[in-house]
Amino acid sequence: MNRKLNIISAAVATLLAVIFLTGCSAAKKGAVKQQNGEIPTDIALQTPAQRYAQLCGSYADWQDVNMPVRLSVTSPKSISLSARAAMKRDKWISISVRMLGFEVASLFVDRDSVHVIDRYHKAYISESIAKVLGSTGVKVADIQDLLLGRGFVTGDAGGTFTAALATAIEFASSPEGLMILPAIQPQEFEYGFILAPDANRIGAASVNVKNRNSGVITYTDPITTPQAGSFAGEASIELMHGKKIAASFKWNFSSAKWNTGEERTWKRPAGYSRVDAAAIISKLTKL
């Protein structure tokens, strides 16, 4: 059991690294994985602008959601965990990992900070968003979209793809398919999205943190919800930060509860010791 809990701690720390690194990174345009599939005739005949408009039409607004999620880490360690995720749109993300009915670890991200609690070792991590993301302009809503498989434009004037944001994006052809690229890229990184070959949905997200980190998020199992439109049922993340960090989020939308008005805040656990996030991520990438 101790070994199992130690692996869980490592896995949750890996997921912390995923949040840290995807918040300001997920590879260069040419590094997106090949998207296989036969292109339907109606998709092949559409212009890029028409495909983008149809993509935007599949989205709907949401305020909050609470649902189960399966967290799988394949590198640097391998483990699969059951968890519960809750999100308040553009305000916070909460993920609780449980075993035998007890919480063993949790992750909480809001507009100010990123927090992780390791119940087994009675330790926690707290870092400011400013320290994690710097001046990138990445918002909590952007991280939510990245995890749930929606395209977006960072910054105060951005948001999830809409018809109104059509002037803020550009299209580019690649061997992998049609790419949607925000016209104005942040100084700290480059990012973009690739449409799936067989439907007007996001098939992958690509980010390159200049001269440092890169990563790709591949989206599968598309689902359309009556409450909030289309999402990706699974997001598979591969990051390069010295060594590969790989994890996936498999969302259980069939059990999701939408727009209940849920509110959450993070509280520092009494008697727990604070540990350094950068040191943990450094150790993970050396495993």
Image (cartoon, rainbow, N blue to C red):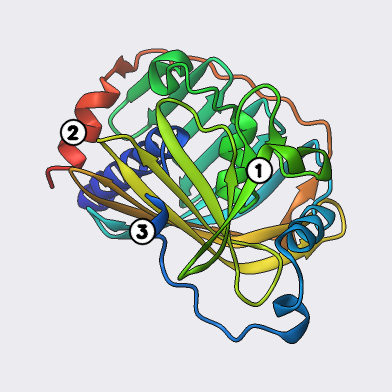
Q: Residues within 10 Å of mark 3 (few under 14, many from 20)?
A: some
Q: Residues within 10 Å of mark 1 (few under 14, many from 20)?
A: some
Q: Is residue 76 left or right of residue 143?
A: left
Q: Nearer the viewer, mark 1 or mark 3?
A: 1
Provide residue 252's location: percent of width, then percent of height.
Answer: 64, 60
- For the residues marked 1 and 3, what is the alpha-carbon distance in whole angstroms? 20 Å
Residue at 45% x, 14% y is: 130
- Answer whether residue 80 is visible to the viewer in this image: no
Please tell me in which quadrant of the rendered image residue 6 appears: top left
Q: Is residue 150 left or right of residue 277?
A: right
Q: Residues within 10 Å of mark 2 (few under 14, many from 20)?
A: some
Labels 3 and 2: the sequence-earlier one: 3
Please tell me in which quadrant of the rendered image residue 177 appears: bottom right
The mark found on residue 31 in the picture is 3
Q: Is residue 190 left or right of residue 152?
A: left
- For the residues marked 2 and 1, what is the alpha-carbon distance in whole angstroms? 35 Å
39 over 132 or under it: above or below: below
Q: Which residue is mark 2?
A: 282
Query: Which of the pair 14/166 is nearer the observer?
Result: 166
Residue at 23% x, 31% y is: 280
Q: Which residue is mark 1?
A: 169
Give the residue type at disc 2. Ser
- Answer whether residue 161 is visible to the viewer in this image: yes
Residue contact at pointers 2 and 1, CB within 8 angstroms: no
Provide residue 146's location: percent of width, then percent of height.
Answer: 56, 45
